[in-house]
Amino acid sequence: SIILLSPTNQVLLLHRVQTSTSFASAHVFPGGNVSSFHDGPLPPLDDPAIHEDGPAYRLAAIRETFEESGILLAKKQGRGRDQCLLHLPAHVLEEGRKQIHGNTVRFTEWLASQGGEPDVENLVPFTRWITPPGPPKRFTTQMYLYMLPLDLPPPPPSSGAGGETTATSHDLLLRQHRPALIPTPTHDGGVEHTAAAFDDAGAWLARARAGDIILFPPQSYLLHLVSQFCSPGSNDNNQNDYGAQRAALLAFLRRTPTSAVADRAGTRMIPWSEKAISPAVLFVRRRDGRAVLGLDKPGPELRGSRRGGDWERVVLVDFRKEGPRNVEVRDREEVLKEEREEGDADGEVAKL
């Protein structure tokens, strides 16, 4: 999945349909499953290497973002790390999405035919999430940060069937401040997402707190971290403000130790690019009945490895039938202190 920042440092979220088999009705980052046809092979499921960043994950993240939102994170061939995005007419993009979604042409082959290549070099690894044991379907998900260029030029207009000028979904999503409809993919007659929109990370979190949208713990956690650096600028067109925000965010992601708080698990010495998080319930709060999720463990598949997550923070969540509600990222020690003050008779909280 990709945490995609717009030229004004807003984050793209997609609204999944109620009938979706995973994350139903939730707002999620663009992304999806790795395809051996498009993205290449992965290590066996029992190989710890399957939980490491690699070419297949990077290609899948860019391909799925294109299929789901119409935004093509590709550059002209031979540009290296130079972020010169490839812009194509609307009808070429939409036809390409259909062909790629239908597996009639490989994503990289289609891109090459358009003079482009996936911009995998500018993906910044930003944690891996592993579904804890229990659910019938488990995932290992590599998260990336991708920053669209601050000086993104408008893509070339495209002529419709009647000769009129039309805007691409790429253009609409980058410039609209209201939800933009995603062109319906021709996949089994169904739709995985109904809308996509950019908004400030803090605004997405506020909407979730108000109960207007559903955010699962990984999305809430990552939006929380991004919101500490990316906020509305003093001037909508001030690239210096947005550039400074990005520089601070990247410095945070590249800094080790990742926290000033020492922990016995040593997670602060694991860079954000290597953190593996498998949320586990520590206890249920007396105060409001919300579950407290620890984020420091990497899951049973990586037990005994040097991987781990974030000891410093926990996620509070009220799991309901319609999905998680009242999700909040908090400091671990503060939450434990509150629980002790509530009166823990059996002393279990003191051991956490």
Image (cartoon, rainbow, N blue to C red):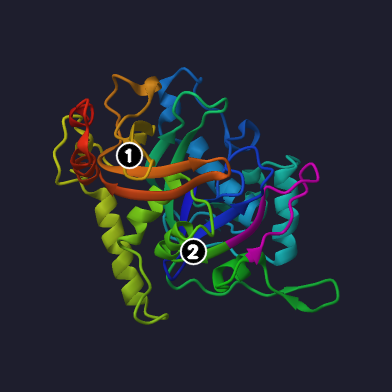
Give the camera-side residue of 136 and 164: 136
Q: Amino acid at mark 2?
A: Cys
Residue 15 visible at all: yes
Task: Label 1, secondary structure: give it.
Answer: loop
Q: State yes or no: residue 319 in magenta.
A: no
Residue 166 position within the rendered picture, expressed as x and y whole percent measured from the top left: 73, 74
Query: Which amino acid is tagged 1?
Result: Arg
Q: CA distance from mark 1 to mark 2?
A: 49 Å
Q: Main secondary structure of the magenta part?
A: loop
Decide: few, some or many residues near mark 1? Use Cα within 10 Å; few <14, some 14-19, many ≥20. some
Depth order, front residue of 123/175: 175
Label 2: state its secondary structure: loop
Look at 62% across and 34% down and name the residue there.
Answer: 35
Residue at which label 1 appears: 285
Which residue occupies the foreground of this view, 114 or 162? 162
- Give the numbered dot on residue 248: none
| Mark nearer the viewer, 1 or 2 | 1
- Residue 216: percent from left, percent from top: 48, 45
Q: Residue at x 55, y 69 (%)?
A: 174
Q: Magenta part of the protein: which range? A: 180-196
Image location (x, y in percent) of residue 65: 58, 51
Image quadrant holding the C terminus, namely top left
Residue position for label 2: 84
Q: Quadrant of residue 292?
A: top left
Q: Is 156 positioned to the left or the right of 243 in the image?
A: right
User: Is the residue 320 above or below the residue 13 in the image?
Assistant: above
Q: Residue visible at 19% across and 27% down?
A: 347
Left/right placement of residue 191 relative to residue 15 reads right
Does label 1 or label 2 sit earlier along the sequence?
2
